[in-house]
Amino acid sequence: MRRPEKEINDLREILTILEQACVCRIAFCDNNKPYIVPVNFAVRKNNLYFHCAKAGRKIDILKKNAQICFEVDSGTEIVTGESPCAWGMKYRSVIGFGRASFITDSAGKKAALDIIMEKYAGAGNFSYKEEALSKVLVISVAIESMTGKKSVVS
């Protein structure tokens, strides 16, 4: 990292950022061209989970190249200044890399969707109709590495 004073080395702080972030941006590489999509997500035990339709560009890309990069951020706030160069941004972010795989069985989908629902809805019992499960694809990303960064400009 070019600015080591901004690096977050504490895994607990990185996990807190992942918990607090509402959106995860997943980056794919398709024939040497980047493609990025925002998704709802959750992280548990070094795996990132998200869901999507069973067909589409990201699925086509993942079938050819399962390597992804992801980014989340939280606590963003613009800090104004006396001049344009004195402006800044407060933020905490995480960038990670991993390998995606498709979860196709109903039990696996339910378990992953429960993790996502717990993030956004809190604790509770969740039920899913088989018809809905058959229409959704759930993706698990085995996180291979991630780094955190923060700016506390004041």
Image (tube, rainbow, N blue to C red):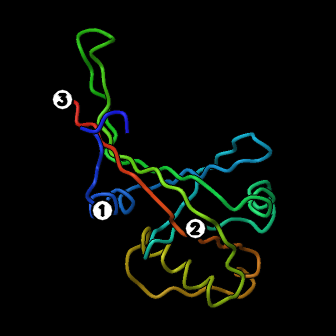
The residue lying furthest to the bottom in this view is 107
Residue lying at 64% horizontally and 70% vertically, measured from the top left: 139
Amino acid type of the residue tagged 3 in the rendering: Ser
> Residue 64's x, y, as percent?
80, 60
Work out whether mark 2 precedes mark 3 in sequence or the reverse, and give the earlier one.
2
The residue indicated by pointer 3 is 154
Label 2, secondary structure: give it: strand
- Give me the disc on residue 11: 1
Residue lying at 76% horizontally and 75% vertically, measured from the top left: 135
> Residue 38's x, y, as percent?
59, 51
Amino acid type of the residue tagged 1 in the rendering: Leu
Instruction: Give me the C-alpha separation between circle 2 and circle 3.
Output: 36 Å
Label 3, secondary structure: give it: loop
Give the answer, above or below, for where 68 lies relative to 87: below
Amino acid type of the residue tagged 2 in the rendering: Val
The residue indicated by pointer 2 is 141
Work out whether mark 1 precedes mark 3 in sequence or the reverse, and give the earlier one.
1
Instruction: Give me the C-alpha separation between circle 1 and circle 3.
Output: 25 Å
Work out whether mark 2 precedes mark 1 in sequence or the reverse, and give the earlier one.
1
Disc 2 crowd rating (10 Å Cα; few below 14, some 14-19, many 20+) is: many
